[in-house]
Amino acid sequence: MFDFIKRWINLTVIIIYKIIWLFSKIQAAKFLHFCKFWYKLNLKNPRTLNDKLQYLNLYYRKNLIINCADKYKVREYIKECWYEQILNKLYNTYDNTNEIDRDKLPNKFAIKCNHGSWFNIICNNKKTLDVKKSTKLLKKRMKKDFSKFHNER
């Protein structure tokens, strides 16, 4: 029962957010921020990390922020700044899950979608990985577009 109520509240918040977003992206960001963190978003004098991130998301219009939000593109920027030594080893990049050759991956690895947070598959032992489940999960996550929901560029 509690799970049903939680889903109903989340759906209600999403619907209200979408309606507000049609009129004002700033007010929509303030509404969603309050629903998520239970304090008022301060865009005039941002103090918390969340305030600053929302400020940048709403007002900063340089391509650097787009490139740094992309897990793959940011690697190129880090290399240009001469900090390549801090990067983890990148085994490969893929456009879809069918391209992944799991035999070539090490025993421990992570597969990350470059467009979202928490979209990672962490594998501590390749032999115990549920390939069907992880592939299905990755396909589902690849369909998500945060720019449509979180007003991200």
Image (cartoon, grey):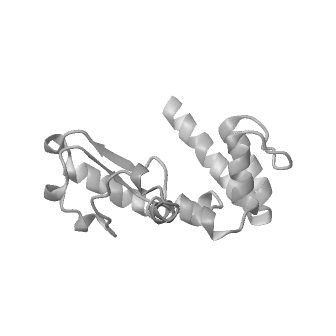
Q: Is residue 64 left or right of residue 47?
A: left
- Between 86 and 36, the one nearer to me in the picture: 86
- Between 109 and 117, the one nearer to me in the picture: 109
Asked if one can make out residue 19 in the rendered structure from this viewpoint, the answer is no
- Residue 112 in percent (x, y) is at 38, 54
Q: Is residue 145 left or right of residue 51?
A: left
- Between 44 and 38, the one nearer to me in the picture: 44
> Which residue is outermost to the right?
44
The quarter in which the C terminus is drawn is bottom right
- Between 85 and 17, the one nearer to me in the picture: 85
Q: Residue at x 68, y 42 (%)?
A: 49
Q: Residue at x 51, y 37 (%)?
A: 4
Q: Residue at x 68, y 37 (%)?
A: 37
Q: Residue at x 66, y 61 (%)?
A: 151
Count of numbered badges drawn on the protein: 0
Task: Quadrant for residue 7, please give it.
Answer: top right
- Residue 48 in percent (x, y) is at 72, 39
